[in-house]
Image: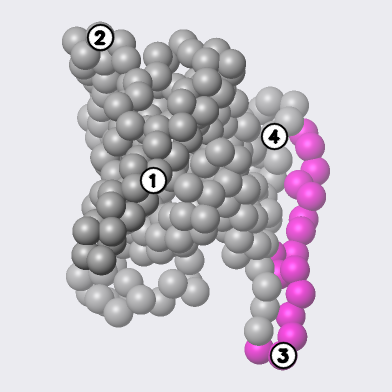
Amino acid sequence: MLQYPSIDPIIFSIGPISLRWYGMMYLLGFVAAYLIGRKRARQAWSPMQPEQVEDLVFTCALGAVLGGRVGYVFFYGFDRFLTDPLWLFRVWEGGMAFHGGLLGVFLALIIYARKLGRPLGEVCDFVAPLAPIGLGLGRMANFINAELYGRATDVSWAMVFPSDSLAIPRHPSQLYQCFLEGLVLFILVYGFTRVRRPAWAASGVFLLGYGVARYGVEFFREPDASLFLDWMTRGQFLSLPMIIGGAAMIALSYYRFNQKGRRFTDYGLASAGVKVNVKATGAQKAAVKLKVKKTKSKKKLGKQGLSSSNSNKKR
């Protein structure tokens, strides 16, 4: 059995203000999303410009926090909410749910995509690789806070968590989730999006990957009081739609992609009538960008010539 490394949940305090590890992990997750987003925005097929990433991350952060809180209250504490509705707003008492945060981010992306005039699928695919690092850091915060621990076990790496009233060895399931939902999921989705993919495919990979990871880890995590079918946890029940929906999104995405002849139209290039193949090399992409610049230059010169002609006529 391993000794639980007791860590103070509060990093430091200045008067009544305290900085907690949970909040710090959220902050680091959003910073990581911003940095990764800036890098992804430089891809030739990106629907976002680097200067738009900051607003995108801020919008997603609001959706994640608000959705996570509302989701926790309605998915895991609805009975308490009925007796104490103001509990919804007492966020300092803790309680966030990933599935609620996911819905909150999705609603935020619907609004943001409409604002930019971009297809929702392309924007969701852009965000998909940005999320796993934050998810992993959030699970690390759960471990530091000694919360959401695993089931009782006798494995050699079991730990006794100080917040456990039974004081028995348990799986450090927070670390399992940190590894699977954070590192593994990031490598999977980020690697998948290193080349251009059909719309909704990256989102499908994220949903499928997270759903499978969460469903599996729930067998090692201490279950909620209420079970479905006497064995399925609430987390597993909520992950099933992600697994089914993610797989369906991937299949439908590639089906529609094949129906369209396996070709894309890049943002910023459509007005020039330039199409880029999904398997285009770096040299081909550079040639496309050069062609677009020339097209824009010709249009600009044409407008200047027309303006000069009209000016001469007026004279």
The residue that label 3 is drawn on is 15
Pointer 3 or 2: first along the chain? 3
The residue that label 4 is drawn on is 158
The relative height of residue 79 versus residue 121 in the rendered view (above or below) is below
Disc number lying in front (2 or 4): 2
Residue at (53, 33) in percent of width and height? 43
Disc number lying in front (1 or 3): 1
Q: Are marks 2 and 1 in contact (CB under 8 Å)?
A: no
The relative height of residue 34 versus residue 249 in the rendered view (above or below) is below
Magenta-colored span: 1-16
Q: Nearer the viewer, residue 5 or 206?
A: 206
Residue at (19, 10) in percent of width and height? 259
Residue 48: image quadrant is top left
- Secondary structure at numbered mark 2: loop
- Which amino acid is tagged 2? Gly
Disc number lying in front (3 or 2): 2
Disc number lying in front (4 or 1): 1
Number of the label disc, if any, that sits on residue 300: 1
- Secondary structure at numbered mark 1: helix
